[in-house]
Amino acid sequence: MSVTVRVPAKVNVQLAVGAARPDGFHELANVFLAVGLYDEVTATPSPDGLSITCEGPDAAQVPLDRTNLAARAAVALAERYGRTPDVHLHIAKDIPVAGGMAGGSADGAGALLACDALWGTGASRDELLDICAELGSDVPFSLVGGAALGTGRGEKLTELEVGGAFHWVFAMATRGLSTPAVFREFDRLAEAREVPEPVASRELLGALAKGDAEALAATVSNDLQSAALSLFPELADTLAAGRAAGALVSLVSGSGPTTAFLARDAEAAEALAAALRTSGTCRDVRTASGPVPGATVV
Ligand code: C5P
């Protein structure tokens, strides 16, 4: 018997970053939107203990040892329920690796839900969310999906109402960016100034609630964008190519380097994707809409 869980990627429509805390994390006002690009995690009982395999375009960059968030999720759940993590985890990976779209977090949430179903632990939603928060700041959102405001280091979630689908184009970059490195660059760039408290934008939350793409385009923001561009200056060309091709707005997704482009509707997204594909400024281009549900057993 195996259990397969499908988990979406995310884009941050607002990422307000405060000053570094004593624990090194940053206080955030992080508005997540789950979008229809998915990883699938399959858990199968394995008498030989924990193992991981991965398939997909970026599979070669995925660690197959216990540093993988999927492995850490299985170990954390097994420890809590006093059992050994005798499971094989297979990850069918479609979310870009080190891309700023929570691909690693998706695999953590997916493995947790898959092992939970396989082992029949009967863990409550709150218990699963606690384990997610231990695994990483973005992991709780991968479990919940939809749209949510993340505060604290991003792990404390308030679910948000969304009044319609938003149509996105994502441009994958030729290399990844390390999230800690992007936060360090944010700190370096912020050194000479006072960093304000991160606050969610009321206009942005209103645009989401209405499902109004133009209003959302006018209010999106990402405080990590300058840091990502500083470490990966070529991303400016991708952002400009999207704007020239008619995107309502172009932004870096999370800590990057994936860039995200909002389109008026599904048809406009396809046209924009075609233009970006021929722009020579990115490795791959995908369309996806959101919000979509979080981790789901399929
Ligand atoms: O929580 P997670 O392990 O995904 O975070 C990865 C890294 O990103 C952290 O080690 C930290 O450097 C940075 N980070 C941060 N502030 C946050 C979330 C992440 O500085 N709120």
Image (tube, grey):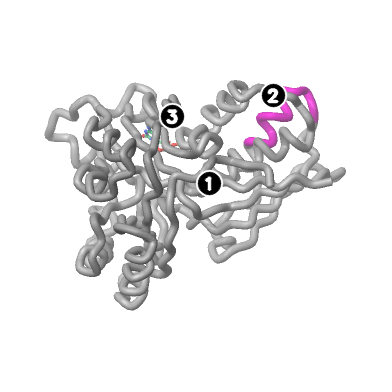
Residue range in magenta is 73-83
Q: Mark 2 or mark 3, which has the lower sequence index?
A: 2
- Report the image quarter containing ligand 1: top left
The answer to whether mark 2 and mark 3 are in CB contact below 8 A is: no
Q: Between tags 2 and 3, which lies in front? A: 3
Q: Amino acid at mark 2?
A: Ala
Please name which of the two marks, 1 or 2, marks the residue nearer to the observer. 2
Q: Residue 156, relative to residue 272: is it above or below?
A: above
Q: Nearer the viewer, residue 148 or 21?
A: 148
Q: What residue appears at the point 79 percent right and 33 percent down from the top-left corner?
A: 119
Give the Cα separation between the discs numbered 3 and 1: 21 Å
Which sits in the foreground, 91 or 3?
3
Name the mark on residue 159: 3
Q: Is residue 135 magenta?
A: no
The one of 150 and 179 positioned closer to us in this rendering: 150
Q: What residue is disc 1 on?
A: 104
Distance between mark 2 and mark 3 Cα atoms: 21 Å
Q: Amino acid at mark 1?
A: Gly
Q: Is residue 259 above or below residue 146?
A: below
Answer few, some or many: residues within 10 Å of disc 3's Cα (few below 14, many 20 plus, some between 14 and 19): some
Answer above or below: position of 138 versus 130.
below
Instruction: Tell me which residue sits at (80%, 39%) in the image.
Output: 86
Label 2: which secondary element: loop
Q: Is mark 1 within 8 Å of ligand 1?
A: yes
Residue at position x 84%, y 46% in the image: 1
Q: Which mark is residue 123?
A: 2
State the predominant SS element of the stretch in magenta: helix
Q: Position of residue 150 (x, y in %)?
A: 39, 30
Q: Earlier in the sequence, mark 3 or mark 1?
A: 1
Q: Secondary structure at mark 1?
A: helix
Residue type marked 3: Glu
